[in-house]
Image (cartoon, rainbow, N blue to C red):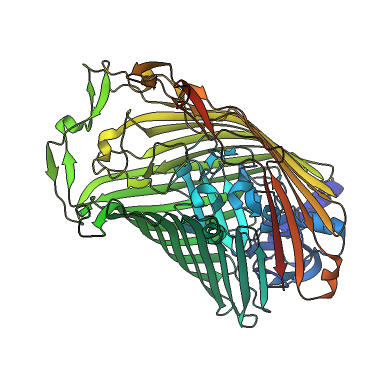
Amino acid sequence: MLHIKKMFFLLFLIAFNALSQEKHTISGTIYDDSSNETLIGVSIYFPELNSGTTTNEYGFYSITVPEGTQKLQISYLGYKTILKTINIREKLTKNFKLKEETESLNEIVIKSNVEALNIKTSQMSVNRLTSASIKKIPVVLGEADVIKSLILLPGVTSAGEGASGFNVRGGAADQNLILLDEAIVFNSSHLFGFFSVFNPDVIKDVKLYKGGIPAKFGGRLSSVLDIYQKEGNSKEFKATGGIGLVSSRLLLEGPIQKEKSSFLIGGRSSYAHLFLPLFDNDNTAYFYDLNTKINFRLDDKNSLFFSGYFGKDVFGINDSFVNTYGNSVGNLRWNHLFSDKIFSNLSLIYSDYFYGLTLDFVGFEWESGITNFNLKYDINHYISNKIKLSYGINNIYSNFNPGKIAPNREDGVQAEELTQKHAIELASYIDVEHKITNNFRLQYGIRFSNFLRLGQDELNTYTNDKAVIYNEEFKKYESADATGVDTFKRTDLISNFHNLEPRLSASYTLNDNTSIKASYNRMVQYLHLLTNTASPTPLDIWAPSGKYIDPQLLDQFAVGYFSSLKEGDYSLEVESFYKDIQNRIDYINGANLVANNEIETVILNGQARAYGLELLFKKNRGKFTGWLAYTLSRSEQQTPGRTANEPGINNGEWYSTPFDKTHDLSINAGYELNEKWQFNANFVLQTGQPTNYPVGQYQFEALTIPVFNDNTRNADRLPLFHRFDVSATLTPRKNKNRKLQGEWVFGIYNLYNRQNAASINFSQNDETLRNEAVQTSIFGIVPSVTYNFKF
């Protein structure tokens, strides 16, 4: 009996000692040793404690561990792992610098795999890319491209070659929130979709959220594309660039005050139009953009950043038609460390999208756009190793310019300005990352959003508030005539919407290499891109929710299986998702969206749904790397009649959206032959885009005119789309012995010259006078060569 009492007493002392053992917080920032760039997603791990964390978007980490001597491991793919033994007696601030792995071929291969699978985290439906991996993917005209790289991932598609924007899990292009250093980018494309606006030399980190979206993000339904620019090298001056067949780029970075502040400025421009006069062609089509960033580390607790982007496209035909459009964004950020557990970021952000059109032969100039000012404050609070809080507020003021016409000559058209619109979107959120047990983790949060549609000069009124009427005699929807006009002051409130947006993600680890995950998120979108084309165009107009346009609401569910195979050499992700969307707008037949001051008269509200299965299998290491991505999905819309007497669109039945792709297969492969040669290839195959074909034809005088069924939508499809691309990168061995480093990239886009259909139009052949289908293809085979350099 005495021995039993002693045993219980000993166990009590051990338990008491463990519980009473003092703990301390170790925090700091992780940097790249060569440039002093902060690193996102670095793993800080104490193996003997089975406890760890990762750096946030600004390279900061915080973790609390028991007092005493502890082994610490700091690892980041592509960098040498740091192994240290630390004697912890009080709270510590420890900054670390990681050195790149460049000593062997295998280590270089690992460097390209920053997108490796994280089994334990509750986060799912997320893909991550780096500038290095983006540059290895063959694309048209040899220009490395962020958006084209994302389209190779599961659940991500585009409307086709030469199409702008991208679609995620059956969503429209306007349902993607695109952020560049936290600033909203409204148009992600140059030259109508041939290039993206993101210069790969400037990009530091790219993360695409397709589901399980954290509560700090809002305002769009389908995805969040979160892109961060580099901060600039604060140790030494560096230059990076590339010279291609149609465009070139240059990036300069260096210290302002060594180790404490730096600058970055990058420029890019196309110049193919300069050669057109050699062929007696007066047309022009080019773009240019500018990226910049300045940062100051004021002290251990405060840093200031300013980042900006300006881009412009110009497309002209004989100076009689000139189209200009572009984005301008700027962000002034202040990072402040309240304590070793509380990190904050305050941002003042400006975003602007401008569209201009000059028609000399008509005699007028047209301009439209959207401008917003965004004040946001985010805090990361590291409560303990098991609980991390993120919370903040966000306030966006938006001004919408639907269009303004001005004469550019005396006999030009009369000046006219469409009614400008104004709105404020307020939001607050809290998000919790919670480690319940070693095997079970949760991320849960809620976002509260409030949208205020402010007063405008004129707002039409209609009988029974119906801006669209159904003509029973002709069996068609028509625009209603306004019965009056309401006028408001800017401070008046036209509409007020508020919504709660819950988010939940869960992960259960079956073993060290396998986990299952599930997520749910509700999202609300208050802005709408007015377009009736499959791919957005610069002429499309953004419009706010209000009296006649309700905000879109999304509920998305996802479940997945994740596995790391053969010690990380391979990884497998399988996800299934279901999306339900309320208040998705569609347009009546014959809707005119251009310069329409009464846009509510061509809009009907409906609902949408998308569901599918995604598979991503990756080979992460070795000379041969790459991935296979496959998506089986449906994306559908339904716009029923508002009364029993109305048919709705497509007779009230579900119909395919313009971005529905039943099958989508992408294969990306890379092979490092030796230090000089690296080869890469893509293969893409997907179901043709939904469209409508004629159901008959009739004769009018000498013309044969096709007849379409106005009661059906997207009942047919374009032919199957597929393409094979290859590239080879040559790195001369003499690079090792000189400061100037260079490489040649040779590529062939669409190797077997597949003529993929961008559209099929039906018209009368001038010679045979018969009605025939005419296919339009954007690209055949396209060779390219680019020289990249750095010094």
Q: Nearer the viewer, residue 639 or 690?
A: 690
| Residue at image location 46% in from the left, 46% down from the top | 446
Give the quarter of the image for residue 101: bottom right
Q: Nearer the viewer, residue 331 or 761?
A: 761
- One can see residue 415 in this view: yes
Q: Is residue 240 left or right of residue 364?
A: right
Whether 630 is drawn above or below 189: the answer is above
> How many numbered discs, if any?
0
Quadrant of the image containing the C terminus:
bottom right
Percent across and percent down for residue 639 are 37, 25
Give the quarter of the image for residue 398: bottom left
Q: Is residue 266 left or right of residue 639?
A: right
Q: Is residue 426 left or right of residue 133?
A: left
- One can see residue 514 in this view: no
Percent across and percent down for residue 554 are 45, 36
Q: Residue furthest left?
A: 484
Q: Is residue 600 left or right of residue 174?
A: left
Q: Nearer the viewer, residue 435 or 517?
A: 517
Percent across and percent down for residue 56 are 61, 60
Quadrant of the image containing the N terminus:
top right
Whether 779 is drawn above or below 588: the answer is below
Give the quarter of the image for residue 16: bottom right
Whether 595 is drawn above or below 107: the answer is above
Q: Residue furthest front?
A: 767
Percent across and percent down for residue 55 are 64, 61
